[in-house]
Image (cartoon, grey):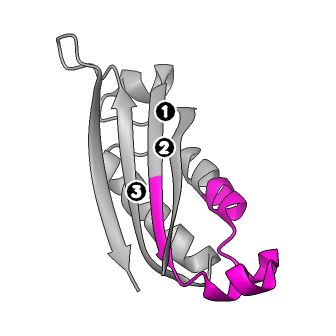
Amino acid sequence: MCIIEIEEMEFYAYHGHYKEERIVGNRFLLDLRIEADCSKAASSDRIHDAVNYQTAYKVIREQMKQKSHLLENIAQRILDALFENLTGIKKASIKVRKMNPPMGGQIKSVSITMSKER
């Protein structure tokens, strides 16, 4: 078993409960953690035997383009899409952070972390 992590992927996207958030947009940082059996890729040294983390990034990028009202929805869509597009994943966790959320005060970020297992 191995762990693949992609940390602090940054996107400017148009997610949020408030209409203004879906018009103006905001910065989002995402962290992905994938647990998989990497033994075949470790032995063969071939990309088709590995969980391709470039594909994982592309899947996440496409999901971030779709507007959502809630971070929970973003996280669930990303996990579902990753499991649909990548074989070999045993478990995945995604952390979605909205930077400087409009909550009436100085707040660095708000986040949700969600996991899914096969």
Query: Given contact means CB atoms under 8 Å apart, are the residues at marks 2 and 1 in contact?
Result: yes
Q: Residue at x 22, y 10 (%)?
A: 106
Task: Give me the disc on residue 29.
Answer: none
Q: Is residue 62 above or below residue 110?
A: below
Q: Residue at x 29, y 27 (%)?
A: 109
Using residue 112 as the reference point, say whether residue 65 is left or right of it.
right
**Magenta-span inclusion, residue 46:** yes
Task: Give me the disc on residue 14.
Answer: 1
Using residue 27 as the reference point, say whether residue 39 is left or right of it.
right
Q: Is residue 88 above or below residue 57?
A: below
Using residue 51 as the reference point, say whether residue 19 is left or right of it.
left
- Which residue lies under the disc numbered 3? 94
Give the amino acid at mark 3.
Ile
The mark nearer the N terminus, 1 or 3, is 1
- Residue 117, position in %: x, y? 36, 80
Q: Residue at x 54, y 84 (%)?
A: 37
What are the residue bounds of the magenta stretch?
Answer: 32-59
**Residue 46 placement: quadrant:** bottom right
Give how far apart the Cα atoms at labels 3 and 2 are: 17 Å
- Residue 88, position in %: x, y? 58, 84
Give how far apart the Cα atoms at labels 2 and 1 are: 6 Å
**Magenta-span inclusion, residue 92:** no
**Residue 81 placement: quadrant:** bottom right
Q: Residues within 10 Å of mark 2 (few under 14, many from 20)?
A: some
- Which residue lies under the disc numbered 2? 67
Q: Residues within 10 Å of mark 1 (few under 14, many from 20)?
A: many
- Residue 67, position in %: x, y? 48, 43
* SS at circle 1: loop
* SS at circle 2: loop
The mark nearer the N terminus, 3 or 2, is 2
Q: Residues within 10 Å of mark 3 (few under 14, many from 20)?
A: many
